[in-house]
Image (cartoon, helix red, strand yellow):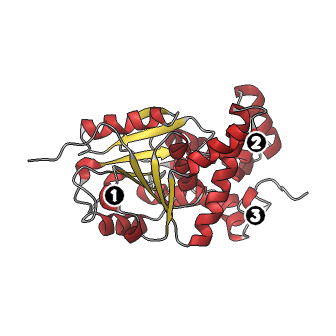
């Protein structure tokens, strides 16, 4: 007899305490879910908890204006739903209703994690990856529970961005998929449906646009500044393409582009860009290093 997937998710385990993992943890505990956040070290976890707490405090100040007691109660009640762990052994994975993998964007590392947890989780536990560039079928190539595996692609910063791409694998059951869509709505997000395809919806459309912006600049068709201004004022984008590349991180964009170029060598949309390769080689990754296509030094 096949165990039935529960309609209501209660216990969530998140692997990865970086920006994505801690952001997902914040919106989950804010909405009443019990969350276990697993990170590499307790120092990293406490740093994530501090950022998470600061985010909750900002929400509390808007929600309970001029009521410091209510603000503190809100933050404390949310944090009571959070548990920090440095290993899956401490996390009681067998009690998890949903496990979200939000670790480094490295295929082998993701596959290794799935292999480590597949014999520990319950027969009803749903497992989701937050990958932004890999196919689900590749991430779960050796995972035995493919019917309970799907994609939940959140966007950074998670608390502010309303979108979640919910990706259905070839073997993902309808019940699992609908449960994940419902979970996204309950944490205040607007989910969109997508099948398992490279880049899903947003990145499949966004990355060629960013790369063509770079090629336009490299051809001398227009300056970086004018391209940014044109796209902001002409299309209503909050950031121009070069500002967005710097925000994403040139190394991150190059990593995805190189992978897609290797997979689709005949597709000119994914051709590497010379200036991006050079900037990454020089350690100029964008906002996080202070310089990319633009400079952010004061």
Can see residue 256? yes
Work out whether residue 223 can be spotted. Answer: no
Residue at disc 1, secondary structure: helix
Residue under numbered circle 2? 221
Say whether marks 1 and 3 touch (CB < 8 Å): no
Q: From the image, which quarter does the C terminus lie in?
A: bottom right
Earlier-in-chain disc, 2 versus 1? 1
Determine whether, in the image, residue 100 is placed left or right of residue 274: left
Report if the CB atoms under discs 3 and 2 are less than 8 Å apart.
no
Foreground: disc 3 or disc 2: 3
In front here: 139 or 74? 74
Residue 197 found in image quarter: top left
x, y percentage for residue 243? 74, 46
Q: Residue furthest toward the right?
A: 298
Q: Position of residue 104 (x, y in %)?
A: 51, 63
**Disc 3 crowd, CA 10 A, few/some/many (<14, 14-19, 20+):** some
Q: Is residue 152 above or below residue 104?
A: above
Please name the residue shown 54% across and 52% down the image: 80
Where disc 3 sits, the SS reads helix
Most foreground residue, 127 or 48: 48
Q: Position of residue 51 (x, y in %)?
A: 67, 55
């Amino acid at each position: 007899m096949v165990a039935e997937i529960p309609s209501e998710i209660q216990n969530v385990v998140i692997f990865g305490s970086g920006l994505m993992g801690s952001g997902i943890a914040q919106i989950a505990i804010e909405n009443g879910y019990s969350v276990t956040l697993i990170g590499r070290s307790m120092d990293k976890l406490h740093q994530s908890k501090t950022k998470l707490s600061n985010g909750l405090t900002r929400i509390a100040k808007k929600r309970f204006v001029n009521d410091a007691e209510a603000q503190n109660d809100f933050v404390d009640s949310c944090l009571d739903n959070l548990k920090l762990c440095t290993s899956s052994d401490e996390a009681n994975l067998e009690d998890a209703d949903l496990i979200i993998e939000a670790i480094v964007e490295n295929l082998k590392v993701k596959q290794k994690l799935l292999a480590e947890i597949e014999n520990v989780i319950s027969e009803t536990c749903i497992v989701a990856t937050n990958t932004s560039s890999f196919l689900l079928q590749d991430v779960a190539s050796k995972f035995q529970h493919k019917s309970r595996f799907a994609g939940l692609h959140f966007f950074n910063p998670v608390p502010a961005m309303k979108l979640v791409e919910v990706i259905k694998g070839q073997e993902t059951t309808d019940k699992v998929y609908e449960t994940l869509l419902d979970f996204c709505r309950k944490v205040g997000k607007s989910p969109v449906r997508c099948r398992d395809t490279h880049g899903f919806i947003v990145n499949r459309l966004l990355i060629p646009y960013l790369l063509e912006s770079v090629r336009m600049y490299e051809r001398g068709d227009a300056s970086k500044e004018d391209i940014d201004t044109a796209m902001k004022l002409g299309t209503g984008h909050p950031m121009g393409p070069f500002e967005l590349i710097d925000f994403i991180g040139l190394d991150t964009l190059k990593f995805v582009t190189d992978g897609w170029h290797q997979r689709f060598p005949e597709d000119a949309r994914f051709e590497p860009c010379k200036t991006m390769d050079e900037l990454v080689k020089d350690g100029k990754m964008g906002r996080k290093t202070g310089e990319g296509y633009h400079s952010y030094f004061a």
